[in-house]
Image (cartoon, grey):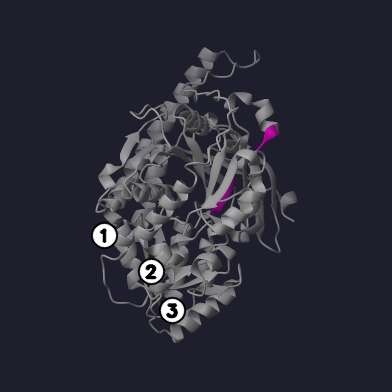
Amino acid sequence: MKIAIMSTMPPNTYSGGRYDAWAMAEGLAAKGNTVYFITNHQPIFYDDFKEYEAHLAIRLIITADFDVEIEENELDYVVLIPNQDKTNYFYAMCRNFAKRKKAKLILRNFESPNWFNKYAPVPRDEKMWDFWKDTCNDGCLVLSISQEAMKYSKEYYVDNLKYTRFDYWYPAMNSKAADKFNVEKEKRIVSFVRFTDKHKGGGDIFDVLGDFLKGYTMVFVVGNGQVTPMYERKLEFLSDKYGFQYEIKLRLSDEEKFKEIKRARFMLFPSYFEGYGYPPVEAQYCNTLCIAYDLPVLRETSGDGIIYCERGNIYAMREALQEAIENYEYKDLKHNVLELGDFGIRADRIQETLEKYLTDDYRNPKAPYLKVDRPKQKVQPVKKKEEKAPPKEERKEQKKEQKSFNRWKDALAETLSEAFDKAAHKCKRAAHLMKEKIKYLRNSIFLRKIPVHLGKNTYHKETGVLYMKGWYLTWREIDRVEIENSSGKSLGYAVFGQSRKDIYEKYPQYGTMALGWEFEGTVGADDLDEFIRVKIMCSDGKIVCADFVIEEENRL
C-alpha cells in the first residue's frame, strides 16, 4: 500500500495524538508499505524509534504550508491527524491532497464532542470538532482510537453515512524501548500529569497524598513542560508535611520514560476523560500497578489489570493508594496487555485494518476541491476614527512610551540578573523565581497590541469561588491564559478559545470567533490582593497582561 499521513507537529513538545500518528507510520513502514509523513516540524520523539528497521524508510516531509508534491501520482490512503486549529486551512490542504492523489481519506478520531463533554469536567464548544466532521463530506474512514470512541463516533459523524466507514485501531507503543531495561522496583510512584488541564485530573493528585507516603518518591512526568510555581509550592509544602520526596521530569525520551515506569511500584492516573489511555497500558507492560478513575475505555483496554476508583472520588483514590502501599506485592501484569503493548502485533493490526478497505471505494464522487484561504501573513491596521489623534502623532507617542518602557525593563532585568547570580548558590527556588521574572520582563509587550477585556466577574466569600469571563483580540497564537494576583501568585489557568460570535461581528478582521476566555477556581480571600492579573502567553514567547479589580459589589 501507498499511504501518506498528514499531521501538524508542535516544536519541542509532546502530544499523545502526534505520538500515535508517528507510531502508526512506523507500524505501516514495518509491514513494507510506502509511507510518507507530511508535517510542519520533525517530531520531538523521532529518534525514539531509530532502532526500528523500517524507521528510515518513512519518507519524512517537512513543510510550512502543507502545499506539497510527492513522486507518487496515486495513493491508497491519506490519513488526516486532526488538531484543534481555529481555521480549516490544514484540513482543506489534506482533503485536497487526498483528492489530487485519488486516495481514500482516513480521519484518526481521538474523541468526538458528544463523548468528551459527557465525561470532561469542563465542557468544550462542539464547534471545535466541526472540521473533523466535515471530512466525511469527501467520503471517510473514521478510524477511532478505541471501541468506546467508535461507539460515540457513530452517533456524531452522521451527515454523510453513505460514504462514511467506522473502525478502530488501538495505538502502538514503543515496546523496544520498554524491553530495553530490567530495573528493580523502588518506593516510587509515577504520574503523567498536565496540571493545567482539568480533565486530566492533575490537580486531584494533591488531595490523594498523605503521611502513608513517607519514604516514597513521587515522580511527575510532564510532557508539555508546563509547571507553574504554584504547583511547585504545593508539592514543597506537602512533601515536608508528609515526608515524601518528589521529582518533576520534563519531556522524557521513551527510554527515560519506561525506565521511570519500571522503577515505580505504582502509577496514579486520575484522568476524567481518555480516548485510549496510554499510561495505564504502559504501566501494566512494565509490571507497575496503576490506580485510575473508572472509565469505560480503561475497562475496555485494561480489564482487571488496574485498580479502579469512582470517577472524581479523590478520597477513594487516596484510600486505594494507601491500601496498595500497605499491602504491596509484585505482580506480573505484562501478560494482560501483550496484545496492546507489543509493537509487532499493533503493526499487524493496522495492516489488516487498512487492507480491509482496499476494495471498498467509499470516496464521494461529488466531493469538490475545497477553496483554500491561506493564513494572512500581514494584517492591515484598522482605520482609526477621525476624532482620535492623527496616526503620525500617535506613533510618535507610542515610540516614546516604548523607549521609556524598554529602558526601565532593561535596567530592572539587569538588577535582577545580578541578584539572581548572588542568590543562586544559596536558594535554588528563589533563583528560579528570579529567572522567571527576568524572562517575563524581557518578553513583555504593550497591552494595546493584544487587548484583553473582562466581562463578568464574581467572588463568593463563603465558597471562595472566583469566576471571571472575558475576551481578547489577537492574531497571535495563544499558548495559555494564566490568572495571577498582584503579588504574582498563580491562581490557575483559564479555559480559552471559546466561541464569541458577538465579538467576531464587531471585529471580523480577526478571522475567528474563538476569542473568549473563562476562569473558575477556588481562591482564598487573602490571595485576591489589590487586583487580579490575566496573563496571556503567546506561542512565540510574548506575554501580555491586563489587571482587573474585583469590585466590592461583585463579592457575594
Q: Is residue 351 above or below residue 499?
A: below
Residues at marks 1 and 2, CA–CA distance in whole angstroms:
42 Å
Q: Which residue is mark 1?
A: 425
Q: Nearer the viewer, residue 204 or 118?
A: 118
Question: At 55% from the left edge and 40% from the top edge, which residue is drawn?
Answer: 140
Q: Residues within 10 Å of mark 1 (few under 14, many from 20)?
A: few
Residues at marks 2 and 3, CA–CA distance in whole angstroms:
24 Å
Q: Nearer the viewer, residue 35 or 423?
A: 35
Question: At 27% from the left edge and 49% from the top edge, which residue is drawn?
Answer: 47
Of helix, strand and loop, which one carries label 3? helix
Residue type at tag 1: His
Q: x and y percent of residue 518 in the render?
A: 63, 47
Task: Confirm whether the magenta stretch covers residue 452.
Answer: no
Q: Which residue is mark 3?
A: 213
Q: x and y percent of residue 125 in the render?
A: 64, 44
Disc 1 versus disc 2: nearer the observer: 2
Among the two numbered marks 3 and 1 on one chain, the one whose residue lies closer to the N terminus:
3
Q: Residues within 10 Å of mark 2 (few under 14, many from 20)?
A: many
On the picture, is 24 further left or further right than 531? left
Q: Which residue is mark 2?
A: 285
Viewport quadrant of the N terminus: top left
Q: x and y percent of residue 48 in the render?
A: 29, 53
Of helix, strand and loop, which one carries label 1? loop
Q: Nearer the viewer, residue 275 or 433?
A: 275
Q: What range of the chain is rendered magenta?
A: 492-501
In the drawing, what numbered circle is on residue 462? none
Q: Is residue 404 above or below residue 6?
A: above
Residue type at tag 2: Tyr
Among the two numbered marks 2 and 3 on one chain, the one whose residue lies closer to the N terminus:
3
Q: Are marks 3 and 1 in contact (CB under 8 Å)?
A: no
Among the two numbered marks 1 and 2 on one chain, the one whose residue lies closer to the N terminus:
2
